Image (cartoon, rainbow, N blue to C red):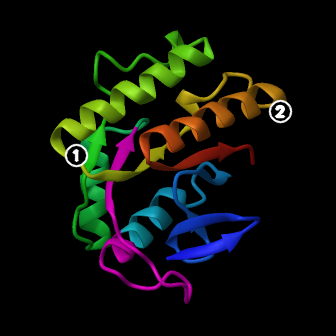
Amino acid sequence: RAAQGGGEELDYLIDEVLPTKQVHLLAGASGAGKTRFLFQYLRDYLDGKPFFGHAVHPCELAYVAADRCEAEYNEKFERMRIERFPLYPILNSPDFQPFKLKQQGQRLDAVKALLARIRKHAPDVSLLVFDPLSPFLPSKLGDYHEVLGGLVALGRLCLQEVVTIWGTHHATK
């Protein structure tokens, strides 16, 4: 669905809530239920169910599991009794070394490489869900300008690669 806004046309994955080709964050304290929320609503999204009364436009997605092992996610699918969706666990991948991603260019290259690897198996992926997104952001998450630079770079990547990023973020309690 498209909506007019300032002369630009916006498409939405979830009408009036989640525009395409942008970066979106779901933040909350550790243990607040961000992953559980995403699991349920991503499953509903893929099944075409409205999101809090807003129409959805399902697309192919990839859920990038960056801080837990695959078994933990599989257990969550079973416990919640929901059908599994495409999951890409990177925690145990030797290529995933978040503490070596010091520079913005390195972090962006890591996201590009990950997207390219995912699209080899699923070429139509247009929604990347990162749980969490923080390994691909500056380490000084309290520094507004550094984080802004990282989000702007990811936003540009979204436009270039025609992908939407929805990431979780662990906020302090």
Residue under the image location 44 percent in, 29 percent down: 111
Q: Decide whether residue 49 is among the magenta residues.
A: yes
Question: Which numbered mark, 1 or 2, is in the foreground of this view?
Answer: 1
Q: Position of residue 18 (x, y in %)?
A: 57, 66
Helix, strand or loop at label 1? It is: loop
Q: Which mark is residue 123?
A: 1
In the image, 78: left or right of 101?
Answer: left
Q: Is residue 90 in view from this perspective?
A: no
Residue 77, image quadrant: bottom left
Q: Position of residue 132 (x, y in %)?
A: 51, 41
Total number of numbered discs in the rendering: 2
Q: Decide whether residue 125 is among the magenta residues.
A: no
Is 86 situated above or below 114?
below
In the image, 12: left or right of 89?
Answer: right
Helix, strand or loop at label 2? It is: helix
In this view, the residue farthest toward the bottom is: 53
- How crowded is the residue under tag 1: few (<14 C-alpha within 10 Å), some, or many (20+)? few
Question: What span is in magenta?
Answer: 43-65
